[in-house]
Amino acid sequence: MKTMTVNGTVVHVEDYWTVLDACRFYGIEIPTLCHYDGLSPGGLCRLCVVEMGEGERTKVATACNYPVAAGLVVRTDSERVVRTRKVLVELLLARCPSSKTLQDLAAKMGVQRVRFTAKNENCILCGLCVRVCAEQMGAKAIDFAGRGKERRVAPPFDLKSELCRNCGACMYICPVCQLRCQGPEPPGVVCGACLNLEPVCLKENKDDEGSGVKCL
Ligand code: SF4
Ligand code: SF4
Ligand code: FES
């Protein structure tokens, strides 16, 4: 057991916890996108940033893969943290504007406009699909490929992998595939939620015979 400070309150934490574990245990909300209980931490979306340290010597770090330490001082709601998260959400939303998960997150965080050019990608490179495939399904049918701007998730050689079990876990867990906003509703429509029931990727990824789910 260790002792650290979160938002000015001294708390006791288990030695093996991350800062995110500690905050969640004490009911402190931290937004996450690439974290999923039961999977190894990815540290890729950066949304879980918190400020660590005191005075002028502070740093911003991701909570989901930062181990707790005795005497650690953490702020989860400082101006710097809030500003950083908002810019990150803007960048992610510019990359995948149709993701309802991202839209909801942006709305919750008070992000009302995106200053970056929309790219209409289908992936925020959070790595959840890669990790669930390897760590929970034991398949390792997909992985990151390419570098820099070309980085993407793909099966080996971009061919449907023999290792894929068609389990659908990668699409289930994906924050971009799960729910797609279908655009502005006509006046008078109360709720467009039903439009989100079938993930677009299920329609687009039929196998060659038109049935089943094709690997990413
Ligand atoms: S559908 Fe295939 S690629 Fe996706 S998680 Fe399952 S085994 Fe992996
Ligand atoms: S396909 Fe989805 S789950 Fe996989 S890295 Fe991209 S956004 Fe994340
Ligand atoms: S949830 Fe921590 S970096 Fe994504």
Image: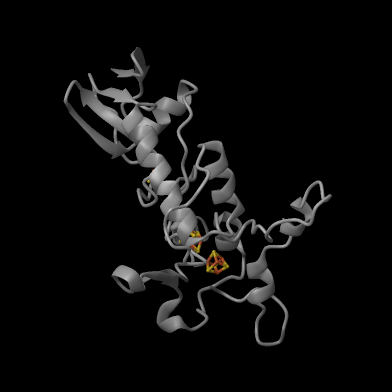
Screen quadrant of the N terminus? top left
Asked whether residue 32 appears in the rendered view, the answer is yes
Across and down, in percent, residue 45 comes to 39, 50
Across and down, in percent, residue 15 comes to 31, 26
Seen as rendered, the residue at the extreme bottom is 208
User: Which quadrant of the structure image shows residue 69?
Assistant: top left
Asked whether residue 17 appears in the rendered view, the answer is no
Residue at 47% across / 47% down in the picture?
A: 33
Q: Nearer the viewer, residue 97 or 184?
A: 184
Seen as rendered, the residue at the extreme right is 188
Residue at 46% across / 42% down in the picture?
A: 32
Q: Nearer the viewer, residue 72 or 188?
A: 188
Q: Nearer the viewer, residue 50 or 132?
A: 50
Q: Is residue 146 above or below residue 80?
A: below
Across and down, in percent, residue 97 comes to 54, 59
Horizontal placement of 164 versus 193: left or right? left
User: Which quadrant of the structure image shows residue 66?
Assistant: top left
